[in-house]
Image (cartoon, helix red, strand yellow):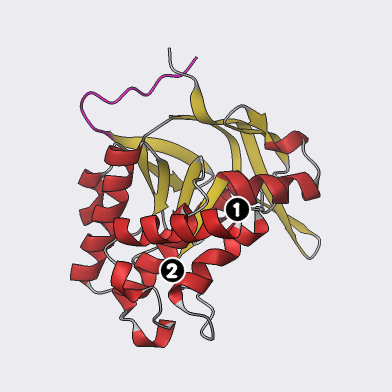
């Protein structure tokens, strides 16, 4: 059987609100294989964004294990989790988070600078990834000169430019109209099909679910699989 690129084992996350302990989710077990496009749904406050933060190593779980590409994040120090995230994870958010005083290409150079990629190699990667999302002619533009859909495509490119193992997107179409939303989800679908990227997208849009290989629903501390595309392997070792 295939080895999962992401494995969650008895994952639990709790917060304290004053002296009261609140459990977001408990004992989640999940395997996602390489090259799968998964959508995560659930009501507001169910813990979807928190789960992405745990998977990316932004914050640790209360208990349980998170294993990404064979690396157990829960065994790493905060510094090593940061290094892991810079190299292995690409993240896309609802807010574009582009630096307004930098051009498109300069925004894309930042993650490459953090990972120590040479300037020559970085420029080549920026050109290639912009071409992939149809923005090769916008490399010298500034964020304010772009439409919302174009800015989100730049944000996706920024998440891909360092060739991550795992791409996580938190409501990436939340600020877009329907046409741009479908265009963005189409880009995600092509990433899985053409490049074999492993992708998890949080979205409230049920009309996007048929694009995914798998759909999960998080509610009341539990995660359930609600949709599997025919022919998709869901079992790891």
The part of the image, by quadrant, that contains residue 8 is top right
Give the CA separation, mark 2 to mark 1.
14 Å
Q: State the image coordinates of residue 17 (x, y, percent, origin top left).
A: 73, 63
Residue 95 vs 215, above or below: the answer is below
Asked whether 22 or 47 is in front, the reply is 47
Q: Is residue 173 left or right of residue 179?
A: right
Q: Is residue 59 left or right of residue 182?
A: right
Question: For the stretch drawn in magenta, what is the main secondary structure?
Answer: loop
**In what element is the residue under mark 1?**
helix
Range of the magenta residues? Answer: 228-237
Q: Residue at x 35, y 87 (%)?
A: 145
Asked whether 71 or 8 is in front, the reply is 71
Asked whether 191 or 168 is in front, the reply is 191
Q: Residue at x 52, y 51 (%)?
A: 162
Q: Residue at x 49, y 25 (%)?
A: 4
First in sequence: mark 2 vs mark 1: 1
Q: State the image coordinates of residue 158 (x, y, percent, origin top left).
A: 47, 61
Q: Image quadrant for the N terminus?
A: top left
Residue at the disc numbered 2: 94
The answer to whether residue 215 is seen in the rendering is: no
Residue 114 lies in the magenta-colored region:
no
Residue 231 vs 229, above or below: the answer is above
**In what element is the residue under mark 2?**
loop
Q: Is residue 111 left or right of residue 131?
A: right
Residue 211 vs 132, above or below: the answer is above
The residue positioned farthest toward the front in the image shown: 120
The answer to whether residue 194 is seen in the rendering is: yes
Residue at the disc numbered 1: 53
- Crowding near the residue tagged with mark 2, few <14, some 14–19, many ≥20 C-alpha atoms within 10 Å: some
Q: Residue at x 51, y 56 (%)?
A: 91
């Amino acid at each position: 059987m295939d080895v999962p690129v992401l494995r969650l084992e008895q994952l639990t996350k709790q917060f304290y609100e004053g002296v009261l302990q609140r459990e977001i989710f408990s004992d989640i077990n999940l395997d996602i294989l390489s090259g799968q496009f998964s959508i995560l749904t659930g009501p507001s406050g169910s813990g979807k964004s928190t789960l992405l933060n745990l998977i990316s190593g932004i914050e640790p779980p209360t208990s349980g294990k998170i294993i990404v590409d064979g690396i157990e994040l829960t065994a790493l120090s905060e510094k090593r989790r940061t290094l892991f995230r810079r190299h292995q994870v690409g993240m896309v958010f609802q807010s574009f988070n582009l630096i307004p005083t930098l051009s498109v290409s300069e925004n894309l150079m930042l993650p490459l600078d953090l990972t120590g990629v040479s300037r020559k190699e970085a420029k080549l990667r920026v050109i290639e990834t912009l071409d992939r999302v149809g923005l090769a002619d916008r490399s010298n533009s500034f964020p304010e000169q772009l439409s919302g859909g174009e800015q989100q495509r730049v944000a996706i490119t920024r998440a891909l430019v360092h060739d991550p193992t795992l791409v996580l997107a938190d409501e990436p179409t939340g600020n877009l109209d329907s046409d741009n939303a479908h265009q963005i989800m189409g880009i995600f679908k092509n990433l899985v099909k053409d490049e074999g990227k492993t992708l998890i997208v949080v979205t409230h849009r049920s009309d996007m679910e048929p694009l995914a290989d798998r759909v999960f629903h998080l509610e009341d501390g539990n995660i359930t699989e609600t949709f599997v595309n025919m022919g998709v392997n869901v079992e790891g070792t």
